[in-house]
Image (spheres, helix red, strand yellow):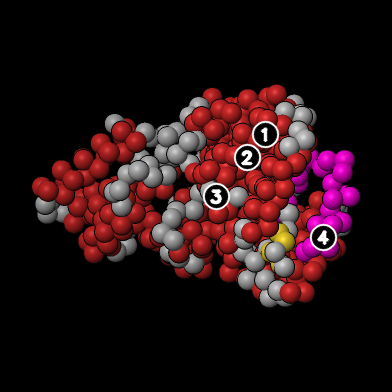
Amino acid sequence: MSKYNQDLNYLLRGTDISDTELFEKITEADRIILEKKVNPKILAEAYLKKSQCLSMLGAYGDEEDDRDYSEESKEALEKVLELYPGMTEAIVLLGDFAIRPSESIVMYTKAIELKPDYAAAYCKRGFHYYISGKYNQAMADYDEAIRLKPDYAWAYLCRGTNRHEYNQAIADLTEAIRLKPNDVGAFHNRGSKYLRHKKYDKAIADFTETIRLIPDDPRYFNMRGRVYVVKGEYDNAINDFTEAIRLGLDWLDYILDIYYNRGIVYDDNGEYEKAIADYTEVIRLNPEGAVEAYYNRGLSYAALGQNDKATTDYAEAKHLELLNRKLTYEGKTIRRLTYYDSFFVRSDLEERSDKILADCTKAIRLHPGEAAIFYERGRWYDTLNQFDKAISDYTEAIRLDPENAEKACYDRGRMYESLGLHDEAASDYTEALSLYINNRKKKGLTARWF
């Protein structure tokens, strides 16, 4: 196929090349390798194509597939570099496997020195500059990648996703979609930009398109459902959460949040029995981590006048440690802010938050070195628009546990952005993304850009 003659660094899996075609390309490469061609460059190219294909398969592989595509890709890459050390495509792929962004940048820079017109190297280096907090250098590399290859959709996707200025970001993502109309990542990222800037109908339209492109992925139904919650379209939200549950039954960690979110929507609709059913499912799937579900199920039982059951659930919540973190003190559990609360503030949230903030403050006195408690108090201040206090708590959470501070960095960045402190916000966003990528790599996982 003609696309096999292209540099696979420019192809997107699922958009430009299917899994079937990737496996066909691996078979083709294996055939060349077994022939043991005398020309080392031909062998190196075969190993390179095999490594690139395996790397693509490993990035979003089936979790039930035990095959270690990433390790096989590395082994093939080693063969490439033995046979042809100066192959720029291989050097770029080596940068993809590096643990630290600084190591990746060194590899991409080396590839650029060898091949100054290699747009893919500029784009990848730009991304790693971005996650290293070097915004201007990142934008310069994206600009150069686009200058060298004006139809480079992934460069527009990266630049649009990373850009601070809203209108320019939307323009880049729209161009990425024009160049590759079936790229789910571009629709997802543009939808997320719209959501952040409260363009809810446009966000729904983009998430609807992601569902059209990948109708069996529960994440996109969940994202659209969350937008419906913000708009107060609870029936639509429930429908999307329900479909996400149907599709995501094998995604345990993910489906817990969906059941919980749907339960809260049922709760606010006054459909307490349905809410209880969803909270009960969360408890069944994760009984040791279901503090929130026990607490909210207790509230639903109380709303139905079933006070004995409510009391039992409150007592059970008090005995559980939330997500294995020290968010308890003297037998009491701090109510953790949910994603739902952060978007949809109920009329009694401020009244309830006073008690919760008092609990957090007392817990901090008892556990002053526990980052998670500062983070949770920061989130409540965040929701109440007490930005300075939120920033202070997020900062302390970051200081106490810097290696696991990706959420605190991201949320502090949002606070800075709300205050118009764009440089500080950009620094926190890049640090959050860097921590996310590095933590996934430490676990042997591939970072997912969208």
Q: Is residue 54 above or below residue 185?
A: below
Q: How far, Cα to Cα, is label 4 from label 2?
A: 24 Å
Mark 4 or mark 3, which has the lower sequence index? Answer: 3
Q: Helix or strand or loop: what does disc 2 sit on?
A: helix
Q: Helix or strand or loop: what does disc 4 sit on?
A: helix
Amino acid of disc 2: Tyr
**Residue located 73% across and 58% down the image:** 334
Q: Helix or strand or loop: what does disc 1 sit on?
A: helix
Q: How far, Cα to Cα, is label 3 from label 2?
A: 11 Å
Do the residues under discs 4 and 2 have CB atoms within 8 angstroms? Answer: no
Q: Is residue 98 above or below residue 293?
A: below
Q: Helix or strand or loop: what does disc 3 sit on?
A: helix
Q: How far, Cα to Cα, is label 2 from label 1?
A: 6 Å
Front-lying residue, 412 or 87: 412
What residue span does the magenta drawing correspond to? Answer: 336-360
Q: Residue furthest front?
A: 308
State the mark number for residue 275. Answer: 1
Amino acid of disc 3: Pro
Do the residues under discs 2 and 1 have CB atoms within 8 angstroms? Answer: yes
**Residue located 31% across and 34% down the image:** 21
